[in-house]
Amino acid sequence: MANLPLANIFNRKTRTTVGILAVALGVALLLVLVGLANGSLEETAERIMNVGADVLFQPPDSSPFLALSAGVLSERLGERLLDVPGVALVAPILIGSLTKVKGQSKVVMMFGVDEASYNEVGVGLEILEGRGLERPLDLVVDTVLAAADNIVLGEKMTIMNREFEVSGICRAGAGVRVFMAISDMQGATAQIGKASFFFIKAAEGVSVDDVSASLKERFEGYKITALARFSEVMRENALGLKEFIRALSIFAALISYLVILLAMYTTIIERTREIGILKALGASKTYIIRLVMVESFFICVMGVVVGFLFSFLGRWGIITFFPTLSVDLNPQWFAMSALLGISGGLLGALYPAYRAAKLDPVEALNFE
Amino acid sequence: MSQRAAILKTVALRKVYRTGSLDVPALQGIDIEIKEGEFVSIMGPSGCGKTTLLQILGGLSRPTSGHVFVDGVDLADVSDAERTRLRCKKIGFVFQRFNLLTTLTVHANIEIARQIYGGPLISHDEVGDLLEIVRLRHKLDYKPLELSVGEQQRVAIARALVNNPAIILADEPTGNLDSHNSEQVLRVLSDLNREKKQTIVMITHNPAAAEKSNRVIEMLDGQVLSHGTVAELVEPEQAHSQAR
């Protein structure tokens, strides 16, 4: 059975290549776009988790998407948090956004931090070049953003109508990509004495669950999240992400379906005479259907493999040219995209296979 | 010969093709009987219904009315699937245009015919033995387009033999061949008829080719005009000149 489909695949190179590339495109699109959506989410969550604190303390009804947080908490709330049993350290954070880098529109989340408490509550700012936030209007950027936008020490950056100076480059991977003193951000945004949330470190020997429970008891209605669960909480709250991924999956399957339908339909017309020969030899309808399906299965499998390669290539391209983006190529999605690519393709081959099986052998043999 | 059973028989066989709103009669009441082991030629001018008759005898096409019996089974009474099965088991086709699968080797062309027939997997040696019958064992791994037309037709005959059919239906098997290749193909068909007792029904325009058969059925306008040996039906001068 495999002989003829394989021979057809290798003898009709253009048709085969187009079929393979189209399935590959669907598979790679799905993997890269889902990877990009999940990757950005995961990478953001991971950086927050890497801060090294134990608990995130936010105002009631806050989103785990920290960029959406407003500075509604009093910075002095930190003192009350320190009174809660099991709380060892507290660091207030005010959130801001950088909307332009070197004149180019860009959205980069910024932390306004009290450097001393921020450094104590977790890994802190690991300065690799220059200094920390020692002077007013000092700015620290991480290595990724510095490399992506060629930001150097001493460079002046106008943010919120104030001229900041890049005083240090810190290790990437924890928190956000741009840091300034909380007092500078409060001043620039007219949110004096305000914080968006607090990072909390539990006292030694006290479990995070116990601290969280104590905080919930004392601050009813406030949003208290153990940072170990932050990634999971973010995924749960990513509104529309599931729908987006579902739409992408349908789109990828549809591409495979339509392309294979067209490719196999053209093939059937092209090979009408061949099908007539097989029927004259005594081939049953099932045999003809199987033949078309096996051929399309091979094309789909090759398309899936090439799609996997394309997705790695796509990830490499995205990471190389847009270093602040992240693409998470998840094994689960490799399986899902393979399933969608192959099932979409097989579904697309069904109608042409049925048409081939229904061909009248005499008419098919006379086909020129 | 009259004591042998009829392996192919038609009764009041009619076939009408519909072209737009026009009915074109191709066969108009054919009654023939072909005995087991006979070598019969069907002759007649183009468009007289020879190929249509062969296709109906082989179960490739259904008659508009009448009956076709293949080894006692009336094809009019069986489903498409059963007709296909019967064709697989009892009949081998040889076409004027060879109809080999050009993407496959000679070996694979024979192998796929066995697959379709549903018999046990064919071994390399068995394929070689089939090709030996048509004296092409050495061309096992060639693709059809690498062979001469005569060789292609001989491969098509070998393929038709893969299910060891009781009946071989050949539609102008020498129509595209020169005299040398025609002679070889006809010799193979004659040998099969003589040695393996296979029933052969061959369409031909060539009286010299028809001379190889035991009997000739002459057709005209969708009807059987006459039966007989080639010597009885064709003027000796005509046979001689066409053979040249």
Image (cartoon, coloured by chain):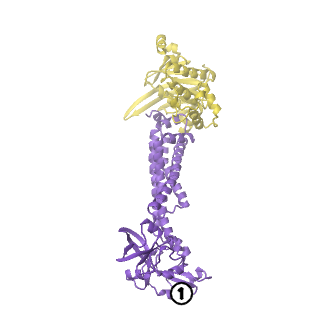
Chain colours: A purple, B yellow
Depicted B237 relative to depicted A346: above or below: above
Depicted A321 relative to depicted B74: above or below: below
Front residue of this view, candidates B67 and A114: A114
Number of numbered discs present? 1
- Give x and y (percent) for residue B203: 50, 23
Front residue of this view, candidates B220 and A112: A112
Find numbered disc 1 in the image and state the secondary structure of the residue it sits on: helix
In the image, what residue occupies the spot 52% across and 83% down? A90
Front residue of this view, candidates A136 and A129: A129
From this viewpoint, which residue is outermost toward the top? Answer: B237
Depicted A150 relative to depicted B91: above or below: below
- Quadrant where the C terminus of chain A is found in the figure: top left
Amino acid type for the residue under numbered disc 1: Leu
Q: Is residue B34 visible?
A: yes
Chain ID at mark 1: A
- Give x and y (percent) for residue A296: 51, 46
Mark 1 Cα-neighbour bin, 10 Å: few <14, some 14–19, many ≥20: some
- Give x and y (percent) for residue B19: 39, 33
Q: Is residue B166 visible?
A: no
Depicted B213 relative to depicted A323: above or below: above
- Quadrant where the N terminus of chain A is found in the figure: top right
Residue hosting label 1: A82
- Give x and y (percent) for residue B121: 63, 37
